[in-house]
Image: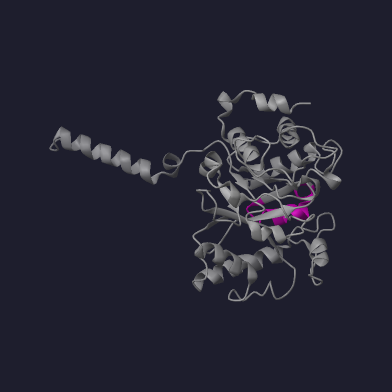
């Protein structure tokens, strides 16, 4: 090497170091220190107001009326459910999917399968599917016109899929990709669960979760979830399930909502207060695989909450802005926000 000019040697070393930095995943990617924040925007537009889910939606505010009124949320929201319109900059999507409603939907021919069709639709619209929140939802499904819906294998949580279900779905993805129907040969399957910790405590259920990319738990603010301290979503149980999931290297989605609005139980910022209580109970707030998705559709006495603008802290978009700021703030600089203090009762 003594024959190589020093200037050329320095250039060669610099190029080698640059190549190492580019090809080394640890160098190329930095851990953000937090997970994703997502939103289920409903009602989106006038067509949605025909819905009677949890009560009539007629006359409610819609997201499309908020054009230009949520620049922060539009820029910083990571994932959106079932919508590529509006002001949101992201093209990353999540959606819910019920397996086991009937044999026609679950046809294992990828050219006929309904799940493949849903993914193909969103990819054809320019979307990137981030998470598929999947489960068997047979009780509600039977009430809503699917008499042949069947439960999963566990009485303790009938939403959980079977090992065969997961294998069939993975096979569908591979075949659909080979046929050119889907962009990828696999997608993240996130098991939506009904019970907050059974899946983490029963070895049979744990074996199913190990075949999937993660877990999503729905925490409502009404019916059996009320009140927080003694209801279905007891913070200690939720935290136990979340921490087990993260310890397995899986992703955990806290699918929060619907939340209540003006009613006998409502007090100012109750929707934030519950989240603060979950965090103080130990639910991870800043973790790269811990995601917070808001499910704020207008169910029962949650209807009537304004959609926006994001400058209104009581609106859905104002709540979303607050959550983005809370989850994505560097914990070294975070401290206790004034809104957290205001949420305390």
Task: Determine if the magenta segment contains residue 208.
Answer: yes
The number of callouts visible is 0
Report x, y in % for residue 224.
Answer: 86, 46
Task: Determine if the magenta segment contains residue 261.
Answer: no
Inspect this view and state whether residue 98 appears: yes
The colour scheme used to paint the residues is: one colour
What main secondary structure does the magenta stretch of the protein show?
Answer: helix
Report x, y in % for residue 219.
Answer: 75, 45
Report x, y in % for residue 256.
Answer: 71, 44
Residue range in magenta is 198-214
Residue lying at 67% horizontally and 75% vertically, measured from the top left:
107
Q: Is residue 24 above or below residue 57?
A: above
Outermost residue toward the front in this view: 59
Report x, y in % for residue 269.
Answer: 73, 33
Q: Is residue 219 left or right of residue 211?
A: right
Residue lying at 57% horizontally and 54% vertically, measured from the top left:
93
Inspect this view and state whether residue 152 appears: no
Quadrant in the rendering for residue 53: bottom right
Q: Is residue 205 above or below residue 320?
A: below
Residue lying at 55% horizontally and 52% vertically, measured from the top left:
86
Q: Is residue 344 above or below residue 107?
A: above
Check the picture and name the quadrant holding the N terminus: top left
**Viewer-closest of 330 and 28:** 330
**Viewer-closest of 193 and 155:** 193
Q: Is residue 178 above or below residue 36?
A: below
**Viewer-closest of 134 and 312:** 312
Check the picture and name the quadrant holding the C terminus: top right
């Amino acid at each position: 090497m003594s024959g190589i000019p020093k200037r050329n040697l320095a250039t060669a070393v610099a190029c080698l170091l640059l190549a190492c930095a580019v090809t080394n995943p640890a160098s190329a990617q930095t851990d953000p220190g937090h997970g994703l924040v997502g939103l289920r925007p409903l009602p989106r537009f006038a067509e949605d107001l025909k819905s009677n889910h949890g009560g009539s939606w007629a006359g409610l505010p819609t997201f499309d009326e908020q054009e230009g009124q949520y620049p922060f949320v539009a820029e910083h929201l990571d994932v959106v459910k079932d919508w590529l319109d509006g002001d949101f900059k992201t093209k990353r999507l999540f959606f819910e999917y019920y397996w086991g409603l009937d044999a026609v939907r679950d046809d294992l021919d990828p050219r006929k399968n309904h799940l493949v069709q849903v993914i193909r639709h969103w990819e054809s619209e320019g979307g990137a599917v981030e998470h598929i929140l999947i489960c068997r939802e047979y009780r509600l499904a039977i009430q809503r016109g699917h008499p042949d819906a069947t439960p999963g294998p566990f009485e303790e949580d009938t939403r959980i899929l079977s090992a065969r279900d997961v294998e069939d779905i993975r096979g569908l993805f591979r075949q659909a990709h080979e046929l050119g129907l889907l962009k990828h040969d696999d997608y993240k399957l996130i098991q939506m669960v009904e019970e907050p910790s059974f899946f983490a405590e029963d070895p049979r259920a744990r074996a199913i979760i190990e075949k999937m990319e993660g877990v999503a738990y729905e925490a409502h603010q009404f019916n059996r979830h009320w009140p927080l301290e003694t209801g279905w979503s007891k913070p200690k149980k939720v935290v136990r399930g979340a921490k087990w999931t993260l310890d397995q290297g899986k992703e955990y989605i806290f699918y929060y909502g619907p939340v209540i609005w003006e009613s006998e139980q409502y007090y100012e910022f109750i929707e934030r207060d519950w989240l603060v209580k979950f965090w103080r109970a130990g639910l991870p707030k800043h973790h790269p695989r811990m995601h917070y998705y808001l499910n704020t559709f207008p169910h029962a006495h949650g209807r009537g909450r304004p959609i926006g603008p994001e400058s209104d802290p009581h609106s859905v978009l104002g709540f979303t802005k607050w959550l983005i700021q809370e989850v994505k703030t560097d914990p070294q600089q975070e401290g206790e926000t004034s809104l957290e203090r205001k949420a305390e009762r």
